[in-house]
Amino acid sequence: MSEITSAFEEATTYELKDEDIERARTLLGVDLASRTREHQTTVGPDSIRNFAYGVGDDNPLYNDDAYGASTRWGGPIAPNIMAGVINAPLRGDPLPAELKKNSKSLFRGIHVFVSGGTWDWYQPLRPGDRLYSFRGEETLEVKKSEFGGRSVIQVGRDVKFNQRAEVVGVYRILRVLTERKTARDRGKYSEIEPATYSANDIAALEERYATETRRGSEKRFWEDVTVGDALPAMTKGPLTVTDIISFHAGGYGFVPYGLPTNRLASINRKRIAPFYVNDEFGVPDVAQRLHWSSAWAQAIGNPMAYDYGVMRECHFHHYLTDWAGDDAFIERQHDEIRKFNYMGDVQFLSGEVTDKRIEDGRCLVDVSMKMTNQRGVDTTFGQATISLPSRADGSAALPVAPQDLKRKVDTMYARHHELVAEDAKNMG
């Protein structure tokens, strides 16, 4: 038996337990300040550029200060979806002792897939913005999984706000927790072969990239959009390990698990031992490496390594901003990730306008989108709502965050400052 197979057999001792499911239900509706520190806590010109490059977005709005100054924003801004990789520690009251005890080691060792999510945005991200957040679980459902037998479907809410206590965005993420052993034993995707490409195939992809367009500084006015309009094509891929590395370099830190090295990795292994599984050389490495190690991905039931679901969320966002133009504001984005995007796969993006309306003075359009791979399989679906400029006034209005949410942000941020002041007083 190989080292990696042996390690896999050990990892598959973790199964979904009824006890864990019931304990997880006690956390529904409980919001906690997020004390995690992401790779980036504050938006800056370099972090914006690196994030955009990490998802393949070359819009000068995200990497050229002079260009940004000429837009309605008066300077560079970040893609709205970058809010997901920025977080400064927020002080707050701890989880009540009984709930903390009840949730210890919850679902430890269970494999988690990001199956989709919904973002609602209210403010653009500007250089200097420091983001905080609080989060909690909204729903939990137990069902039979197409891939891994029994599964748990969880939806969590992550509320992001800046140093001015403005609600920047709300992210609801759908996670699927599956039992690793069941997934491997069923071998649902074992028939999928790795993609291969001839020189002519690559030339055809290069031609697709060369013909893609970005709206940029040319305003897309609401009055000029018609229901049924097709969005131009976009290409993402073929997926490589380099893409995964670039995404991490752009700011995706996989906090709180993290990707530390050397001594820090040793400390992390002691903190969350089940997150580490021996590789084929007997070296403990993160279970998360299924995104770049096909050997490990195969050991847990997939034919090869695959992307992060959030990467495709970022690709949809790139698709929307290229089409809408620099004066638009993406208000809402929802996506459903149905199939894996394996190493070597290409995703072809397409979409159309499904509705347009005026709501609270904002000129809105709804868009549906999908990704289709080179096998002709639809892998990802999405919908979005975009505020476009009107010919009447030339600018796209921003949405207003719900008042109850704004009050919750004010309360959480006030408590943060109280605790910071208490610490300062005690240290003095």
Image (spheres, grey):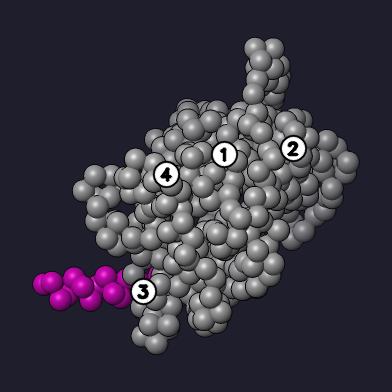
x then y, percent, for residue 345:
64, 32
Between label 3 and label 1, give the one nearer the viewer. 1
Q: Determine if residue 206 is in view.
A: no
Foreground: disc 4 or disc 3: 4
Q: Which numbered disc flags the more N-terminal residue, 2 or 4?
A: 4
Q: Residue reaching furthest bottom?
A: 98
Q: Is residue 426 magenta?
A: yes
Whichever of callouts 4 and 3 sits on the residue coming sooner in the sequence is: 4
Frontmost of labels 4 and 1 is 4
Q: Which residue is mark 1?
A: 304
Measured Cα–Cα span from mark 4 to mark 3: 47 Å
Give the Cα separation between the discs numbered 2 and 3: 43 Å
Q: Mark 4 or mark 1: which comes first in sequence?
A: 4
Element at label 2: strand
Q: Which residues are magenta?
A: 411-428
**SS at circle 3:** loop
CA gap between label 3 and label 1 equals: 41 Å
Mark 2 and mark 3 lie on one chain; the one further toward the N terminus is 3
Depth order, front residue of 193/168: 193
Give yes or no for contact between labels 3 and 1 (Cβ–Cβ under 8 Å). Answer: no
The location of residue 85, given as percent across then percent down, is: 46, 50
- The tag earlier along the polypeptide, 3 or 1, is 3
Q: Helix or strand or loop: what does disc 1 sit on?
A: loop
Is the C-beta separation of discs 4 and 3 under 8 Å? no
Amino acid tagged 1 = Met
